[in-house]
Image (spheres, grey):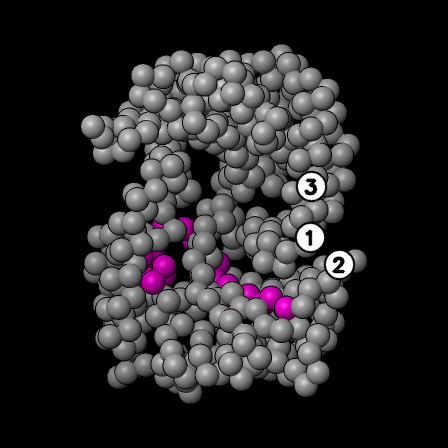
Amino acid sequence: MQQVTRRKLGTGINLTCVTTPKFKRAVLRVMLLLPLGGADAACRACLPHVLRRGTAALPDLRAIGAALDELYGARVEAAVRKEGENLCIGFLADCIDEACAPGAAGTTAGVIRLLADLLYAPCLSDGVFRAADTAGERENLIDRIAGQKNDPRAWAARRLIELMCAEEPYGQAALGTAEQAARITENKLHAAYQRALGEAQIELFYCGTLAPDVVEALFAETPLVQPRSGKPYLPHTGIAAQPSGAPREVIEEENVTQGKLSLGFRTGGSCLTGGDPAAYWLFQTAFGGSTGSKLFVNVREKQSLCYYASAQFVASKGLMIVNSGIENRDFARARDEILHQLESCRNGGITEAELEGARKSLVTSWRAMLDDPLALERYWMGQAAAGTLVSPEDRIAQVEAVTSEQVAEAARQTTLDTVYFLKGAAK
């Protein structure tokens, strides 16, 4: 049985503990939550990777690697994420759980100290980040931004969001722009680092066997919970229940062999913090979230209009995104059939068997999350960014109680916002 505890350790500093004997490795996270986008966007995306290159006491990757080896092979990775309209940057770590290895006492404390040093005691040169570290990670960031286009499926979904949410922070990329990245210097990066430390909400996480009081005490021994001046950023996400105007259709050509069709919908306000998210999850799963869904069975299998078709409920922002791969010639037919299947759901066309299949699929996926500490970390990070604390077990109970009429109502609340077609131009 998992026990979830959330505590405020200081102004703008929160700790979430998942206490469980289930796993052999403990997972820890230190994350700064900041507004998405802005002039510092690329610097903030670059920052954890530069910090990961060394601390004042462990000045290079070799020294950090040796320290991790001493901590029973612990691992620490830089993290850059988008949760709703919030940017989350920092570090994710895992180590052997102390209850699983004789002589491993103190391992968790050692990892926490290392995480604190990575964030608060970086390796500097003349008061700023080292030029070589900054240059290396700047080029890596530029490559990551450019490389996003290498996956047309993900790129089409990303372009849909950019177009659909062009007037909202959610339309901004977590990595910033290539132009911003190219202007990063060690001085600019260090200035952005200082601003981030002063402005961010800090989210700490632990999943393992240690009691919450013990974990809190370990964090309290580090600068991670030091008193902070000023008013830290309060994570938030604006939810638009309906589109701002008539549906838009955008077609762009790229040198890809397969067209990518993405449709973006507003959910009528259903999201992590409003509406009826449980009903919406169930509707989305029945509509396009499983191999028994309307889109998979009808659009893909029966009519062969696409190579894949799936729907995703972006609960943090109150959106539903449909992604599909099609032949160019099938654009209009595939678009119209996707909308036809939505209309069927609105009119109560989801059968009892389809509904129960979707319910089983959704419940199974949430129960699987309870068996994966990294999935739990990601889940609770999303909850923290949204300002809510609904457990996976509670979500399961909610979904199990949803009726067919609630599902049909969720479908009726769904409104098309934007159609994006990445047309294949390859010969």
x, y percent for residue 260: 36, 29
| Residue in the image at 51% along x and 13% along y | 340
Q: Earlier in the sequence, mark 1 or mark 3?
A: 3
Q: Amino acid at mark 3?
A: Thr
Identify residue for label 1.
Answer: 370
Residue 142 visible, this angle = yes
Identify residue for label 3.
Answer: 364
Q: Earlier in the sequence, mark 2 or mark 1?
A: 2
Residue 36 on the magenta segment: yes
Do the CB atoms of the residues marked 2 and 1 lie less than 8 Å apart? yes
Q: Which residues are magenta?
A: 25-46
Q: Name the front one of labels 2 and 3.
A: 3
x, y percent for residue 251: 29, 25
Position of 312 with respect to 137 (left or right) is right
Identify residue for label 2.
Answer: 2
- Residue 221 bears which disc, if any? none
| Residue in the image at 24% along x and 52% along y | 178
Instruction: Assess disc 3: are there few (<14), some (14-19) or many (≥20) residues with their C-alpha within 10 Å of its C-alpha.
Output: few
Residue 423 on the magenta segment: no
